[in-house]
Image: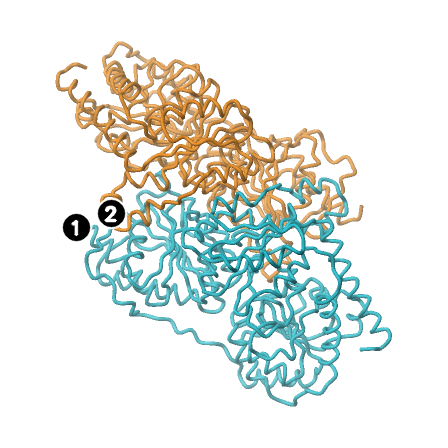
Chain colours: A orange, B cyan
């Protein structure tokens, strides 16, 4: 081992070993030359699970999916140049969805920067404001001080990626040729970390608490809103808090409150349907809003909140965020959600008030119609059927655009634990397949609900599933284009609509299935769907169920169902039958 | 038309109209909601050609390809969020390859920024240091002053994208709902621009010229190197300059000097083969190097230049660049290449010196062996055959990694104009299919030579070809993985090699062809290739010719051929037969 190889090996091994010691034990590698020493050392580390994913855009979303499923930082590694730029969409999603991600890019050494060297771009701050920390690492050296620096950087990055709000951290590694480390010696310490970060949680001082409790006492008609991204460890405390104060919880499907072992007595899930009704919004006026997590998907809920005035609106989050798209929040409470609920589960209880009961009644009516109402076969009905057939313990990943909205409508409270996921950081339709596949490594039966556009966008993501035999059931709603646009004002004036927004692709996904060795079935009508789902469960690997639907009918059917809910509830309200 | 719609319409129409007036008359649109008014107004403009491309990564490379083919700025338009981040790889390629690109991203208005609004990310300076200019535009207004500002920004951006060195410019447009402009009125001025940029070119002062001429007189054994990206308008002047001074030109295939109507008397094209020979490098010692364009692809040429000492090395470029990866350049001459050559075609001519003749003799031997030598069927031979069969007037786009290197070896001087292209800004293997398709809109027969990894990476790019019936012949060298790594030191120590670098994907591209409605043929042996090429020419649309090759054999065959060249030339040098 020459001096160069010795420096290269000890420096990068120290960094990797400390990363692993701090819990970063899965890495998604995209092949390349400059990243060779890092790739080899990760692969050589006995405590690391590696995945190879040749398309860096998919690779980054795949890493994001693993991190989401396992709630730990995951590393992604690529070579220099535009390879690293392909990570950008997933890095941004990780930032906004608060997912810990360790982004490792190999770079040319300083003397080859900005001089026209091949595959060399300016990689300093490559991800701009979208990472929590970006470090241009020193060139490899092997003095004790520099090895400490490498270890400290790894521990610090891993810790930072996890501290609230969690997010991506970027390390750029300049590396000189030759790029081959020595794998002969004892390089790793069996994942015993030298340094670690213990991230404390924020609580309320007694003065803060007393202030908040006095408001709670005064404003008895409170409403809890649980959005995507709230801390899963807080769920039971939120339930206890809500029960104690007799508060209804409007729970977004991504809050994970609609399903699981916890009590769901206070959980209201059909608000998207009944908050479309003007009478409801007039009659039910909350005096206090308390939100955990991001804003829910539901547009009617957003409009309802927007219509309130002079109502205290608390946004509780563990990190210093400002999540208030409708500018209605009055108090930003930076406090761990669980501690907040435990601290405020005190004072006079409110259990017997009619407030909660009224919401539950109206919710029951809406849910009952959505659940049992007579509907023609369409996307909504298919989603409802899919959810009903999901086995306990399954995960369902919903693409953005229509799928997450249909899940919001048709995912009702259930006992068996089914977790619901989506990329709601930046709500992109990119990387959805890869993120779901990353999550599928968490060993729960995985279902992906996705439209044809988003499925097409990340078809490349399927290669990793083929390579590693990952198991996933993909339901593709093929309405031949951008279905959601048919719900927007763009559709009413037809000029250029089909060309710019409908964007029919006329793709037959059976050949894509063949390309990736997937099991494929086509669903043309209602009777075929249930069997197709059951059939997919009998197979292993990638299962694609393509459901042919129609954009115009879909809009009409959705609107019909919502109208029916409106009429029923408006009628009961008029007759004082609630 | 209400006030909002009036502001929205007049402001965005003014911007677009001025862009068009400044030559930006093609736009690649990726569907989205926030970008609706820009998309509608572009589509409505009578002077604009629009393309719809749903995957933003491919869309941006497609736009880059159009700009490369037509040597004019092309606009790309997408919605807010990660959609815009998908542009990043192509934006970076445009920066380093000096391609004018107008990047238009729609954004939420200021009150919806950084507050957790859906599909809203921080888009300010989204592309960091990789654009020449990034503007966060004002919100739509319709006062005369603001319409002037919109027009000035458009003209300035278009001008800046073209001025040396050309590159990408980014406009971020915050837009409020409702997003529908009025298309009823007279909005456009028939593409008469109000403002325009006239970019001057840099010349030499007489003092500078005299200095350079005196060096030219003193150092008679000069060598001209023409790399990728030199100004095509300078080619004839470079030829005249070289002829006048009796200087050989080492011409990279991407310099466009190896083919076309100009004289090729001084053009040496087989240097990659003969500069592998130590004896050649010892015997032929240039006294002066003059380079136009970026560093050529050839590694032996790079090593040859690196081995020179105390040799003046001029790098001539029209913009202020520092393209010197081997740190051997002595003079950076910021001057238009054509003006430089015209100014310095003076002083004593050097036509009869043996210097040029020696290089030509050795070049003839090397080319002759490469051209006629007996080779087993392999990737190199296939590339040679492909080039021989290219019709005059065709364009060939070479992917990075092995294809561009094989083209460097086997593309010999020819009369009929065949232009050679590649993405050599950042040398990525991403976006290659889309860039070639973008170039195919330039109406020359288009051939793409690509490996299986790069082809897979940008398969999505084919959708635009299907949609618009673009015509392209794609030769996929399928060696089942990353062929170039077999040439690198990583291959010699086999540990983890196949897993990390070989990355076999075991893909059968016939199903991918079916998915995109492409004409497909499989070539397993030599006898099938020529017919497959001829057959492809008989069809329209996407034609995929998959050539199955073997990585190990390919390395062995390449090395064998190079050895043969070495032996022949080394022998002649020893016998003084040159």
Circle 1 residue: B2
Viewer-nearest residue: A18 or B255: B255
- Give the chain of mark 1: B
- Give the chain of mark 2: A
Image quadrant in which you'd find residue A230: top left
Viewer-nearest residue: A306 or A436: A436
Expressed as whole percent of the image width and height from the top left, the position of residue B174 reads 32, 50
Q: Residue furthest left?
A: A575
Horizontally, residue B416 falls left or right of residue B156, namely right
Residue A357's place in the image compared with A459, above or below, is above
Callout 2: few (<14), some (14-19), or many (20+) C-alpha neighbours within 10 Å?
few
> For the point 65% across and 69% down, which residue is it?
B412
Image quadrant in which you'd find residue B421: bottom right
> Does residue A133 show up?
yes
Residue A241's place in the image compared with B16, above or below, is above
> Does residue A138 show up?
no
Please give the label number shown on residue B139. none
Expressed as whole percent of the image width and height from the top left, the position of residue A129 reads 46, 46
User: CA separation, marks 1 and 2?
Assistant: 19 Å
Kindly state the secondary structure of the residue where label 1 is placed. Answer: loop
Contact (Cβ within 8 Å) of mark 1 with mark 2: no
Circle 2 residue: A494
Residue A237's place in the image compared with B407, above or below, is above
Kindly state the secondary structure of the residue where label 2 is placed. Answer: loop
Viewer-nearest residue: B546 or B58: B546
Q: Residue furthest right?
A: B575
Horizontally, residue A452 falls left or right of residue A307, namely right
Callout 1: few (<14), some (14-19), or many (20+) C-alpha neighbours within 10 Å?
few
Residue B19's place in the image compared with B362, above or below, is above
Q: Nearer the viewer, mark 1 or mark 2?
A: 2
Horizontally, residue A459 falls left or right of residue B220, namely left
């Amino acid at each position: 081992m020459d001096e160069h190889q010795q420096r290269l090996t000890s420096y990068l091994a120290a960094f990797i070993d400390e990363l692993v010691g701090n819990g970063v034990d899965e890495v998604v590698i995209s092949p390349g030359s400059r990243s060779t020493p890092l790739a080899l050392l990760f692969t050589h580390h006995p405590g690391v699970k590696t995945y190879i994913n040749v398309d860096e855009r998919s690779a980054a979303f795949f890493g994001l999916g693993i991190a989401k499923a396992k709630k730990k930082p995951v590393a992604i590694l690529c070579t220099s140049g535009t390879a690293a730029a392909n990570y950008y969409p997933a890095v941004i999603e990780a930032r906004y969805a608060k997912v810990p991600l360790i982004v490792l890019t190999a770079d040319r050494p300083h003397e080859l920067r900005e001089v026209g060297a091949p595959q060399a771009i300016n990689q300093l701050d490559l991800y701009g404001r979208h990472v929590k920390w970006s470090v241009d690492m020193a060139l490899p050296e092997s003095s004790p001080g520099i090895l400490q620096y490498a270890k400290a950087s790894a521990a610090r990055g891993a810790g930072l990626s996890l501290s609230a709000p969690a997010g991506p951290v970027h390390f750029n590694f300049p590396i000189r040729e030759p790029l081959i480390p020595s794998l002969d010696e004892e390089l790793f310490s069996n994942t015993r970390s030298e340094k670690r970060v213990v991230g404390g949680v924020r609580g309320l001082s007694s003065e803060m608490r007393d202030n908040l409790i006095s408001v709670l006492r005064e404003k008895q008609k409170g409403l809890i809103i649980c959005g995507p991204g709230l801390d899963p460890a807080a769920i039971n405390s939120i339930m206890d808090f809500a029960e104690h104060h007799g508060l209804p919880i409007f729970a977004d499907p991504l809050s994970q409150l609609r399903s699981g072992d916890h009590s769901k007595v206070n959980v209201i899930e059909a608000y998207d349907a009944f908050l479309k009704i003007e009478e409801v919004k007039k009659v039910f006026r909350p005096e206090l809003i308390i939100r955990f997590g991001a804003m829910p998907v539901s547009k009617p809920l957003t409009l309802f909140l927007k219509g309130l005035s002079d109502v205290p609106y608390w946004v509780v989050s563990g990190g210093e965020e400002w999540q208030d798209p409708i500018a209605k929040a009055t108090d930003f409470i930076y406090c761990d959600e669980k501690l907040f609920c435990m601290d405020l589960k005190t004072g006079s209880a409110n259990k017997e008030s009619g407030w909660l009961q009224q919401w539950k009644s109206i919710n029951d009516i809406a849910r009952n119609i959505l659940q049992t109402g007579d509907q023609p076969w369409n996307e909504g009905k298919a989603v409802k059927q899919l959810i009903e057939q999901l086995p306990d313990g399954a995960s369902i990943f919903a693409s953005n655009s229509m799928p997450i909205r249909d899940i919001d409508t048709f995912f009702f409270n259930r006992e068996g634990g089914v977790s619901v996921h989506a990329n709601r950081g930046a709500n992109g339709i990119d990387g959805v397949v890869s993120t779901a596949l990353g999550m599928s490594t968490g060993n729960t039966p995985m279902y992906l609900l996705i439209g044809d556009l988003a499925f097409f966008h990340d078809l490349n993501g399927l290669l990793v599933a083929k390579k590693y035999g990952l198991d996933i059931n993909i339901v593709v709603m093929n309405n031949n284009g951008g279905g959601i646009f048919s719900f927007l004002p763009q559709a009413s004036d037809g000029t250029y609509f089909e060309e710019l927004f409908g964007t029919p692709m006329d793709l037959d996904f059976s050949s894509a299935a063949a390309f990736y060795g997937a099991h494929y079935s086509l669903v043309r009508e209602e009777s075929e769907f249930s069997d197709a789902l059951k059939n997919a469960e009998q197979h292993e690997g990638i299962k694609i169920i393509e459901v042919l639907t129609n954009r115009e009918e879909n809009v009409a059917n959705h609107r019909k169902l919502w109208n029916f809910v409106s009429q029923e509830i408006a009628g009961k309200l008029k007759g004082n039958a609630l």
